Image (spheres, grey):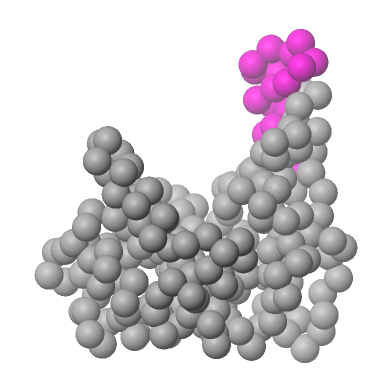
Amino acid sequence: MTPFSKKMNDVDFPVTDVLDGILAAQDVGFTDIKVNMVVKKGCNEHQILAMAKHFKGSGIILRFIEFMDVGSSNGWDMAQVVPSKDVIAQINNVLPLEPIEANYAGEVAQRWRYQDGSGEIGVISSVTQTFCHECTRARISTDGQMYLCLFANSGFDFKTLLRSGKSDLEIANAIMSTWSQRTDNYSEMRGSHSEEKISNGRKVEMSYIGG
């Protein structure tokens, strides 16, 4: 598993250190831990079942994420995307699964549990099963920019709003106004223009705004 994990994280960080960190978090009492695995065809799709087996029964929720064109530096290619339905089928063939309801409206992960009651997994399918119309997520960068979409190329100046002296209600209203005017639906556009390159400028990098 290690060589492929290093290739995926792009910083030569050993998977053993990640696993040790997860165990340390459990040891000090952290619960509801989720581990994300980005699946990339030709790189790590052969590790799907191994990952599922590793975390099954551990109390940790493993989520498989389709390889996304986040930012402009990861060399994304649709041919490298492993659809979530294939991930579920691969696991279900060995470890029977059944779908379960979302925890809340707008949850991006589709939830599945093992039929033997030994835990659950999730899949995030923002390439093959877009959910722009249900999205409720915004992200704030370390320099105070609020991004309304993971694929956005610009944000809103949240830091200045916070430092403007406005009341909590005024700030909340400003955020709601900004959100209500959002037109971000990059994933849906991508899906409906598979034969055509969509130009969205230079998209924000994941490392800049977090997952």
Left or right of 173, for residue 61: left
**Image quarter in which the N terminus is found:** bottom left
Q: Is residue 70 above or below residue 161?
A: below
Q: Is residue 57 magenta?
A: no
Q: Residue at x 77, y 88 (%)?
A: 195
The number of numbered discs placed on residues in the rendered structure image is 0
Q: Is residue 188 left or right of residue 102?
A: right
Residue 146 falls left or right of residue 134: right
- In the foreground, 44 or 80: 44
Residue 147: % across, % down: 72, 45
The answer to whether residue 199 of the structure is visible from this angle is yes
Describe residue 114's horizontal placement relative to residue 135 as left or right.
left
Residue at (65, 25) in percent of width and height = 172
The percent position of residue 41, horizontal first and vertical second, equals: 54, 85
Of residues 1 and 32, the one drawn nearer to the viewer in this rendering: 1
Q: Nearer the viewer, residue 35 or 147?
A: 35
Figure quadrant of residue 164: top right
- The percent coordinates of residue 134 (x first, y second) are 56, 56
Q: Position of residue 50 (x, y in %)?
A: 31, 77
Q: Main secondary structure of the magenta part?
A: helix
**In the image, what residue occupies the spot 76% across and 11% down?**
165
What range is drawn magenta here?
Answer: 162-181
> Does the segment drawn in magenta span residue 180?
yes
> Residue 166, relative to residue 181: is it above or below?
above
